[in-house]
């Protein structure tokens, strides 16, 4: 791992700077959608009052930056209760964007994740990764993605499979593209 990587919470002035990272994870995501999400997360973290000497906020966005302040990775998180594990750090939007040291950035993010979980009194960490990491082509050959291996090396294991149903597709109240109005009131 490159010792030049620094884990820091995302600052408000870095929201636009983080957008290319998020696009690597979610191509086609609009900048306004990212800005709204990041602002909402940062607003809730500010309300909790995370400052010097205090516990981190229960919700936030953590980044890994180099010494010049360039972002190389990030994840969003929420600390919440879990039936089996007790207080758990739930991590989403884990993304690494680096040409030369993907594993180093991933390791820095994983170490930041564990430190954050410990400071928040969490007994477990749950991370949701994009499905591309579970596909057979990401597990073999020269195109092997190092991120799942970084998780395993740091002591993480696959515990569940997460399914998602997009309700906008089946919702009777969804806007119709042709009319721009609701079908059912």
Image: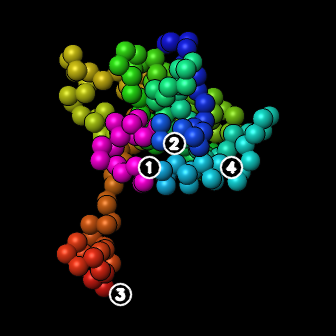
Mark before the other along the chain sequence, 4 or 2: 2
Decide if residue 138 is on the left or right side of residue 3: left
Mark before the other along the chain sequence, 3 or 2: 2
Query: Which quarter of the image is occupied by the C terminus?
Result: bottom left
The residue segment tinted magenta is 18-34
Q: Can residue 34 be seen in this view?
A: yes
- For label 2, the crowd category at 10 Å Cα-Cα, with few meaning under 14, some 14 to 19 and many 20 or more, is some
Mark before the other along the chain sequence, 1 or 3: 1
- Residue matched to label 4: 46
Decide if residue 174 is on the left or right side of residue 34: left
Mark before the other along the chain sequence, 1 or 4: 1
Residue 20 locus on image (x, y percent): 39, 36
Cα–Cα span, label 3 and label 4: 37 Å
In the rendered view, tell whether residue 113 sits above or below residue 108: below
Residue 64 locus on image (x, y percent): 53, 27
Q: Which residue is drawn at 42% across and 54% down?
A: 33
Cα–Cα span, label 2 and label 1: 8 Å
Q: Residue 34 carries which label?
A: 1
Q: Which residue is drawn at 21% across and 16% down?
A: 142
Q: Residue at x 34, y 36 (%)?
A: 24
Q: Residue 185 carries which label?
A: 3
Cα–Cα span, label 1 and label 4: 18 Å
Residue 101 locus on image (x, y percent): 40, 16
Task: Name the secondary structure under disc 3.
Answer: loop
- Residue matched to label 2: 15
């Amino acid at each position: 791992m490159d010792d030049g990587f620094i884990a820091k919470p995302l600052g408000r002035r870095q929201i636009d700077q983080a957008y290319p990272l998020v696009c690597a994870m979610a191509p086609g995501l609009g900048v306004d959608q990212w800005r709204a999400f990041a602002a909402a997360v940062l607003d809730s973290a500010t309300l909790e009052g995370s400052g010097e000497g205090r516990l981190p906020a229960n919700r936030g966005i953590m980044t890994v930056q180099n010494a010049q302040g360039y972002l190389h990775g990030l994840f969003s998180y929420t600390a919440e209760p879990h039936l089996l594990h007790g207080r758990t750090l739930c991590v989403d939007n884990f993304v690494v964007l680096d040409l030369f040291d993907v594993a180093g950035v991933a390791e820095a993010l994983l170490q930041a994740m564990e430190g954050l979980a410990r400071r928040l009194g969490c007994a477990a960490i749950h991370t949701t990764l994009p499905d591309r990491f579970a596909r057979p082509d990401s597990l073999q050959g020269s195109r092997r993605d190092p991120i799942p291996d970084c998780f395993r090396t740091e002591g993480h294991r696959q515990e569940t499979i997460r399914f998602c149903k997009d309700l906008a597709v089946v919702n009777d109240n969804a806007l119709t593209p042709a009319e721009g109005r609701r079908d059912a009131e």
